[in-house]
Amino acid sequence: MSVSMSFFALCRKIFAFSLLSRLLGLVRDLAIAWLVGAGPAADLLAQALRLPHIFRRLLAEGSLSLALTSVFVQLSLPKGRLLYWTLHRRLFWLLGLLLIFALLCSQPLARLLSASAQEAQKLVPLLALALPYILFAGMAALSMSYLHARRSFTVPASSPLIFNCLVLLWVLLASLWPEHAVPVIVCGVSLAGLAQWLWQEWPLRRHSKVWQEAAFSKHELQSELRTILAAQPQGLLAAATPHLALLCAMIFLANYGPGQVSALFYAERLLELPLGLIGICLGIASLPHLSLAASRRHFGRFARKLERALHITLLLILPAMTGLWALAPTLTGLLFGHGHFAAEDLPRVAEMLVLLLPLLPAQALGRIVLTACMALGAWRMASICTLACLGLIVSLCLCGLHPVIAVACGLTGYAMFLWFWLLYVLVRQGARLRFAPRFLLCALTCALCCALCAQGGISLALFLDLGAAAQVLLGLSAGLLAWLIALRLLRQRDLWRLKKLLGERGQSPKN
């Protein structure tokens, strides 16, 4: 199969849908915050949704989707269809058994996530409503991977829009019964996940008879299935690294007092917008190209495409991190200071957001590097790094370090180790990544200019006695303008790449 759509065109298409989806997701999270607040009820909601959130990320945006996409890219159309429907049946029963096991273990799961037995008893019925999302997320990931491999990105990219719209409807319904808001929202998340799966499967069901005409040997098909399924446990562990790390942080934060878990939940949701638009979007767009180059053993092309994705990721994620640092107190007050959200909870969310900011470059770069590892089939090394990362986080938390700082240290080490290992693999294949220290210094300088000017814009708005919305708007505009000017002066080639990403044409500068 040839990947005919260019990297930049593919990024633009995924970026447009991701932007709409993340904005809707932000509205969804704000509606939940205004309805539930940041107290004990919000802690229960965050704990109930943590496991489904992990499974959604490691299945729909993680190893299952990454691995199956790289497999389907390399198969012919009839064989790919046959393999898809065979996997469809087996994965359904496998995830169904996993769901039954998780429901039977809901009591110990609730006790693990809660700080006391009384909280665990309240969490058990919520887990029963939330855990079915495991099945729906896995089946949606299978459909997504096949559609991505066949260059169909519209339906899978629009499925998060369906999910967020339906959850918003359930939040609206929950507002009619505030005393039962948390179980209604959790139930709405599971049902929205079911709709997301069916939305991606219906275009495949329309052609369900075509695959039956293909004839392949049973032995060949079983060999393909064994290879794919045997690699999944290691790959799933690697893809779940950020979410397992945050799960560890949530478990330790439950002992820090009420409101800490919900503050982590809301602060993490604010990071979803830049992380989804940059790390996940570029990872999805890079995977077909990297998989094709790896399967044909064109490691020089593989290194160039990976270098381009890493450059764009760093240029975008660093100013997002520094800009959020400058805007954190004002932004949290503007977004969450409404409804049942108490004013005394806002500083806690702002502080948690600042602590989480180092996770942005660690997760975004880790996502791109993990995508490259998946394209090379390096499951085992990624899973070993994951175990080391989780061990480091738990050790630091037990030593008394703040859980979020421990997670930042662990994920940074995880991304760096995978990066150096990838450099070693490419050097052995006769390729190299041209990732100069000068580029990193220029990217950091641009990001620093963004933070300083954003802070200056907020200070000017405060001097003029403007409202919170005007402060955020002025700070954001000043930071963005300063970043573009600095990028124009220091990195003309990368500015050209960003213009091409946005659809603008022009001659590549020799910088």
Image (cartoon, grey):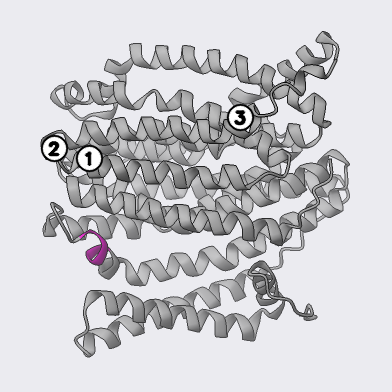
Foreground pick, 31 / 165: 165
Q: What type is the residue that disc 2 sits on?
A: Trp
Residue 334 part of the magenta-drawn span = yes
Q: Which mark is residue 142?
A: 3
Please, which residue is most extreme toward the bottom here? 464
**Left-right relation of 384 to 432:** left
Q: Earlier in the sequence, mark 3 or mark 2?
A: 3
Give whichever of discs 3 and 1 has the lower sequence position.
3
Kindly tell me whether residue 384 is visible in this rendering: no
Report x, y in % for residue 98: 46, 15
Mark 3–mark 1 Cα distance, whole angstroms, equals: 31 Å
The part of the image, by quadrant, that contains residue 375 is top right
Amino acid under disc 3: Leu
Image point 84% across, 31% down: which residue? 76
- Look at the numbered discs 2 and 1 and tell me whether their residues touch, using CB distance below 8 Å: yes
Q: Which mark is residue 173?
A: 1
**The one of 223 and 6 positioned closer to us in this rendering:** 6
User: Where residue 295 sits: x, y (%)?
Assistant: 84, 38
- Residue under the image location 36 percent in, 51 percent down: 269
Q: Assess disc 3: are there few (<14), some (14-19) or many (≥20) residues with their C-alpha within 10 Å of its C-alpha.
A: many
Q: Is residue 303 left or right of residue 207?
A: right
Dot 1 falls on a residue whose secondary structure is helix
User: Which image quarter is the N terminus in?
Assistant: top right
Local crowd at mark 2 within 10 Å, few (<14), some, or many (≥20)?
few
The crowding category of the residue bearing disc 1, from other C-alpha atoms within 10 Å (few below 14, some 14 to 19, many at least 20), is some
User: Label 2's element?
Assistant: loop
Image position, residue 470 (x, y; %): 28, 79
Residue matched to label 2: 177
Span shown in magenta: 332-336
